[in-house]
């Protein structure tokens, strides 16, 4: 009998916990990388906003309010609260968009900055977490004799 490629009991490659979409992005073994993704995403948002508002920095009161939000930058999955996992999924809370709009005063610029932010979250998450997970899964499959 050949090994099953999609074993429902397969655990996280980093910590052996039950793997889910949320766990991939919130695995306790990857906290430093997750923090790096969040920090990079925040810096990128400030850079995008600085194109519209050259004097802006991370200490601007509106950005402080955005960056200290109690769940948006959280690495803990929550089924009914917006967390960083939702940014990874490509979702934005309306309040986030409204804060960006206070800088741009322009719907198209707001949309461009928000989409650029989400793209940065996606690219950084892919580079720092997803691709290494995929490589580790391939190695794990090959060690079990799964080659196709």
Image (cartoon, grey):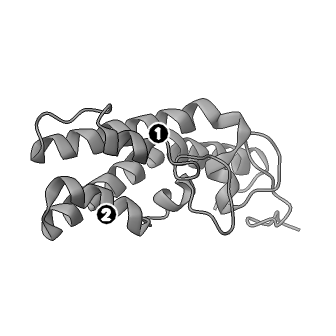
Local secondary structure at mark 1? helix
Tag 2, which secondary structure? helix
Q: How many callouts does the rendering have?
A: 2
The single residue placed furthest to the front in the displayed view is 61
Residue 88 spot, x, y in % from top left: 48, 57
Is residue 93 shown left or right of residue 141?
Answer: left
**Could you tell me residue 138's position as x and y percent?**
63, 49
Which residue position holds label 2?
A: 98
Residue depicted at x 59% and y 29%: 32
The residue drawn where x is 74% and y is 67% is: 6
- Position of 87 with respect to 1 (left or right) is left
Work out whether mark 1 precedes mark 2 in sequence or the reverse, and give the earlier one: 1
Give the label, 1 or 2, closer to the camera.
2
Q: Going 10% across and 37% down the picture, which residue do you hit?
A: 54
Give the quadrant of residue 102: bottom left
Who's the residue at 39% across and 36% down the image?
40
* Left or right relative to 23: residue 36: left
Checking the image for residue 37, the label placed there is 1
Is residue 27 left or right of 144 when viewed as pictured? left
Query: Measured from the top left, where is residue 74 in percent x and y?
Result: 59, 47
């Amino acid at each position: 009998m050949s090994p099953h490629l999609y074993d429902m009991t397969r655990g996280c490659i980093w910590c052996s916990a039950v793997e889910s979409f949320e766990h991939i992005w919130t695995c306790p073994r990857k906290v430093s990388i997750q923090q790096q993704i969040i920090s990079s995403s925040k810096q990128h948002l400030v850079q995008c906003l600085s194109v519209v508002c050259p004097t802006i920095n991370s200490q601007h009161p509106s950005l402080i309010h955005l960056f200290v939000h109690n769940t948006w930058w959280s690495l803990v999955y929550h089924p009914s609260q917006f967390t960083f996992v939702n940014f990874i999924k490509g979702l934005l809370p309306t309040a986030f968009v409204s804060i960006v709009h206070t800088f741009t005063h322009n719907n198209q610029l707001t949309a461009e900055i928000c989409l650029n932010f989400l793209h940065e979250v996606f690219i950084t998450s892919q580079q720092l977490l997803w691709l290494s997970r995929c490589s580790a899964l391939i190695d794990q499959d090959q060690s079990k004799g799964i080659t196709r």
